[in-house]
């Protein structure tokens, strides 16, 4: 790793690069899935390669290759310089980068039990037992149990002398029951919809999820949903469980505070942000109890690291303080445009991709309430849980989310199950109506499929979230 | 030069041969799937190039069957040592897998249709040529005091499949795409073009349409939520059709009774003005001769005059449900939630021009495209999403005003049952990084439900 990375830095300098950074990485992953008692997937994958980014004549060029010989790397550097020069040929403003310090560091995910050392038979047994427990419910037509683990060893070197080695291990698991009566289809997942939940940890995290213990409830709820009433429409009090609030944070805050979006750099694809730079420090994003933070240092977060993929230290960045919008996620080439420095949020998926501004771990800070206090103090409302559907406009303003399951709340109690619940609002209006946030069920929700950029990159991010209440929200389609 | 004589073809087939030969002594059956992807992309925003990327990779996946057990392993190095280790890894995994009750061997070789999915000149496109194409759009936007964003991209995909039952195929395909989002003070306009050859892309036309839409979008009014007649431009139709394809033509959900078409095959399910097929061989698209089982792709009638007529299958689902594969095996490293579905959907064009649709509309909305579509109910194909890139109000046969983006929530079978007219031209669309396509015409629908509006 080290030899080829150093060679790339030296060659790029010789060929005229003003700045170069190089990532050499090795990646392994294992995926297991049982569906209806049969093996759906049992896969081991490994890849390795090098990604080289150069700055020449005011433009960026990036080339990646799986071949790590000197001849190939030299060819890639020539290509990268050609790309950079072409970039500089269509440019209206000078590219300015925020400062970077030389860094020498190492980081490894702490864990108790290496997931790649756990016998395969043990992993299969856990998934098979959980799968069988889902199938006890006769209405369940599709029972899935899934497990995932990966490890990336990454060496970052740049032309200012940084040498950063990071070894990240991420694990996750989940179960899902699809129930059908021929007329309707309903789904329940645990711990959450996107193949379960994920953490930067060892196998001990999977063992602690309680997949087998939760399977009967999950299957039963999927079956009960077939008979449940549809969620009624209307403007009501909405209580969101952390499993759904994590996605709400992700879509209406996490993406909205990406500075490249706010500056228009994503307008050709996923869009811009209603949180334009003139809003910083002046825009009331939510109610006073809403505090949102991007924290790349959170223990166990799947968006946790020591240095980002530009070699900037991981940071804890307040995004919304007491309802006021105060911070962006940024990188070296976006931060100077708001007279700031990088927040250390440039991330790339693997060696193959160029770093872009990404979420790290974006949390809604815990509030003062317990879940029981929130429910018992609600006279009338709808409680929703589990991600089912999501859609938000290109400036992260108007959204509509659907959940797997809901319960009607009357006089502080859950009185009946409801199916097909969804709600719609706009981001600042929604967050301004937050009047209670729990602290006792705050946890990390790992999302494995955050998509952004062209070429498209799908990355892991975490959200700390707990149950919270929102007043006067449009439920269902008006 | 014959495609099999290409240097990469030789290297890919050689790697496949090594894997199959190695595995035949270690497993009962073995298959391998090799994907090579070269993707060059010039991205621009605020009238300047912001990112210029060339990425390449090749992934070899090995699948073995050993005493009824399946194991899979993959790598991205094609040297014999790594390939041998990957075969061994798949065999080791298989030893721990549960016995699959219905597992059979891999499919046998069939005759693959000869298609030409590769434009050799496109493989050699330079960074300067791509930047020049960006400059066409940027210069036109600057001249109109607008700002442009988007990307120009070229993708070269190599695919090889081999197995111990005799399949041994290789193919190379190219895709070139340009898209532009042009932004004004409040308005925005979108246009795109997708072709097999970079040199067939119409960047001037993309710039012209996006700029015109942007200028027409300035000063949008807000429309109240409700049901409106709509004209869906080709891109908007293609987006709904792509969801329809994934949700309605998944053979597993169909046979499990969980799909929209379950128990509806042979019945009229859409407007009789609509005919939809899986058309992977069409010369005007991105032709593709075989799937990830190494089996021939073919044209499949899915909806004929509104009647459900067909379903797509890969080898495994075909055998499971007593049907023959239609050549729709997905890439084996796709996430498991990506099911079998059509890869080259084609909705047949009708006879009505867009101008005639507008002139026939008493009151309604013209939609350029949709944004961030989500599935609210998979069996009913209930979708939600926003309009984007140019939404306009029509009154008495004329566009009278731009409209702020609207949120729709609609059952697509219902929408496709309210067809008034079908556009006279189908256009090819593809999504970033994917080689699948949707070819669709404009659609005029008598009603479409909107339940909210954006601020812009």
Image (tube, coloured by chain):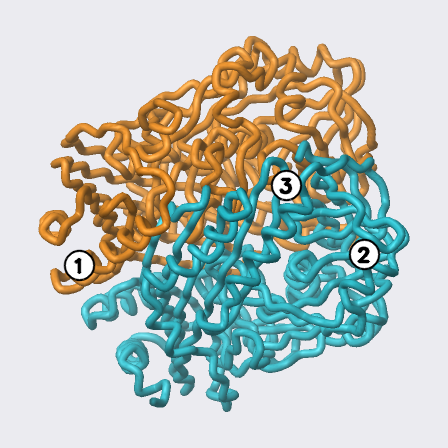
Chain colours: A orange, B cyan
**Which residue is tagged 2?**
B415
The residue positioned 46% from the left and 54% from the top of the image is B151
How far apart marks 1 and 3 lie (CA) works out to 44 Å
Q: Is residue B384 visible?
A: yes
Residues A315 and B337: in front is: A315
On the image, which quarter does residue A309 sit in? top left
Labels 1 and 2 touching (C-beta < 8 A): no
The residue positioned 73% from the left and 50% from the top of the image is A185
Q: Is residue B95 visible?
A: no
The residue positioned 67% from the left and 17% from the top of the image is A433
On the image, which quarter does residue B327 sit in? bottom right
Q: Quadrant of the C terminus of chain B?
A: top right
Mark 2 nearby-residue class (10 Å; few <14, some 14–19, many ≥20): some
Residues B436 and B422: in front is: B422
**Which residue is tagged 3?**
B187
Q: Are marks 3 and 2 on the same chain?
A: yes
Residue reaching furthest to the front: B143
Mark 3 nearby-residue class (10 Å; few <14, some 14–19, many ≥20): many
Residue A268 place in picture, x, y as percent: 51, 47
Residue A144 place in picture, x, y as percent: 56, 51
The residue positioned 21% from the left and 29% from the top of the image is A100
| Chain of the residue under the numbered disc 2 shown in the image | B
Left/right of residue A289 with respect to residue A149 in the rendered view = right
Of badges 3 and 2, the one in the foreground is 3
């Amino acid at each position: 790793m080290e030899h080829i990375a150093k060679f790339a830095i030296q060659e790029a300098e010789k060929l005229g690069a003003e700045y170069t950074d190089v990532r050499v990485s090795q990646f392994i992953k294992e995926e297991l899935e049982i569906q209806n008692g049969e093996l759906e997937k049992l896969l081991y994958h490994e890849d390795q390669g090098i990604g080289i980014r150069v700055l020449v004549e005011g433009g960026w060029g990036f080339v990646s290759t799986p071949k790590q010989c000197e001849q190939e790397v030299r060819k890639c550097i020539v290509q990268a310089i050609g790309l950079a020069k072409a970039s500089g040929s269509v440019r209206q403003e000078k590219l300015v980068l925020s400062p970077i310090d030389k860094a020498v560091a190492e980081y490894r995910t702490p864990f108790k039990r290496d997931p790649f050392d756990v016998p395969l038979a043990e992993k299969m047994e856990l998934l098979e037992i959980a799968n069988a427990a889902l199938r006890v419910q006769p209405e369940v037509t599709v029972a899935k149990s899934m497990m995932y683990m990966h490890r990336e060893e990454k060496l970052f070197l740049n032309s200012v002398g940084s040498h950063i080695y990071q070894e990240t291990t991420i694990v996750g698991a989940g179960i899902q029951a699809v129930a059908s009566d021929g007329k309707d289809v309903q789904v329940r997942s645990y711990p959450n919809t996107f193949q379960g939940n994920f953490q930067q940890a060892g196998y001990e995290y999977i063992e602690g999820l309680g997949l087998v213990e939760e399977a009967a409830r999950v299957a039963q709820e999927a079956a009960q949903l077939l008979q449940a009433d549809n969620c009624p429409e209307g403007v009501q009090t909405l209580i969101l469980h952390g499993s759904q609030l994590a996605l709400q944070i992700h879509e209406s805050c996490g993406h909205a505070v990406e500075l490249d979006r706010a500056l228009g750099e994503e307008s050709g694809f996923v869009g811009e942000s209603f949180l334009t730079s003139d809003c910083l420090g002046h825009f009331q994003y939510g109610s006073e109890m809403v505090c949102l933070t991007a924290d790349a240092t959170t223990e166990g977060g799947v968006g946790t690291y020591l240095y980002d993929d530009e070699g900037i230290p991981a940071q804890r960045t307040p995004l919304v303080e007491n309802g006021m919008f105060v911070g962006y996620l940024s990188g070296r080439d976006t931060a100077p445009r708001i007279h700031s420095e990088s927040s250390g949020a440039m991330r790339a998926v693997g060696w193959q991709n160029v770093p872009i501004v990404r979420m790290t771990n974006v949390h809604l800070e815990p509030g003062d309430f317990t879940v029981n206090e929130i429910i018992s103090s609600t006279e009338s409302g709808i409680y929703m849980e589990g991600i089912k559907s999501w859609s938000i406009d290109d400036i992260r303003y108007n959204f509509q989310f659907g959940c797997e399951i809901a319960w009607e709340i009357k006089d502080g109690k859950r009185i009946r199950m409801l199916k097909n619940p969804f709600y719609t609002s706009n981001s600042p209006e929604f967050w301004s109506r937050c009047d209670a946030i729990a602290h006792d069920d705050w946890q990390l929700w790992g999302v494995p499929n955050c998509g952004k950029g062209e070429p498209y990159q799908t990355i892991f991010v975490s959200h700390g979230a707990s149950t919270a209440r929102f007043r006067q929200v449009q439920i269902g389609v008006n | 030069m014959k495609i099999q004589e290409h240097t990469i073809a030789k290297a890919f087939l050689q790697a496949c041969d090594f894997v199959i030969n190695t595995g035949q002594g270690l497993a009962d059956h073995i298959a391998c799937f090799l994907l090579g992807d070269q993707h060059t992309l010039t991205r621009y925003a605020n009238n300047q190039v912001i990112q210029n990327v060339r990425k390449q990779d090749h992934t070899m996946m090995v699948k073995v069957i050993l005493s009824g057990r399946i194991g899979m392993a993959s790598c991205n190095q094609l040297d014999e040592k790594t390939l041998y280790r990957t075969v061994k890894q798949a065999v080791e995994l298989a030893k721990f897998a549960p016995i699959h009750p219905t597992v059979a061997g891999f499919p046998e070789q069939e005759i693959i249709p000869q298609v030409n999915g590769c434009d050799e000149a496109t493989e050699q496109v330079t960074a300067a040529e791509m930047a020049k194409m960006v400059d066409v759009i940027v210069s036109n936007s600057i001249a109109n005091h607008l700002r442009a964003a988007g990307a120009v991209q070229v993708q070269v995909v190599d695919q090889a499949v081999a197995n111990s039952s005799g399949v041994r195929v290789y193919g190379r395909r190219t895709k070139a795409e340009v898209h532009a989002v042009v932004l004004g003070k409040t308005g925005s306009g979108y246009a795109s073009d997708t072709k097999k050859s970079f040199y067939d892309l119409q960047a001037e036309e993309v710039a012209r349409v996006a700029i015109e839409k942007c200028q027409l979008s300035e000063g949008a009014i807000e429309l109240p939520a409700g049901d409106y007649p709509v004209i869906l431009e080709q891109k908007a139709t293609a987006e709904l059709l792509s969801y329809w394809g994934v949700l309605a033509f998944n053979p597993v959900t169909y046979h499990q009774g969980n799909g929209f078409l379950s128990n509806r095959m042979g019945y009229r399910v859409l407007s009789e003005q609509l005919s939809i097929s899986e058309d992977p061989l069409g010369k005007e698209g991105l032709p593709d001769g075989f799937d990830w089982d190494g089996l021939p792709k073919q044209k499949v009638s899915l909806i004929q005059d509104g009647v459900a007529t067909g379903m797509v299958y890969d080898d495994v689902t075909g055998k499971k449900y007593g049907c023959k594969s239609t050549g729709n095996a997905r890439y084996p490293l796709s996430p498991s939630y990506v099911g079998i579905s059509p890869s080259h959907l084609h909705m047949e064009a009708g006879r009505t021009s867009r101008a005639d649709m507008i002139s026939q509309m008493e009151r309604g909305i013209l939609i350029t495209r949709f944004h961030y579509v989500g599935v609210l109910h998979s069996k009913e194909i209930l979708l939600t999403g926003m309009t984007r890139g140019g939404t306009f109000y029509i009154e008495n046969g004329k566009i009278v005003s731009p409209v702020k983006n609207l949120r729709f929530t609609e059952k697509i079978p219902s929408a496709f049952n309210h067809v008034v007219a079908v556009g006279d031209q189908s256009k090819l669309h593809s999504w970033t990084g994917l080689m699948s396509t949707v070819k669709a015409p404009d659609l005029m629908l008598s009603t479409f439900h909107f339940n909210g509006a954006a601020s812009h």
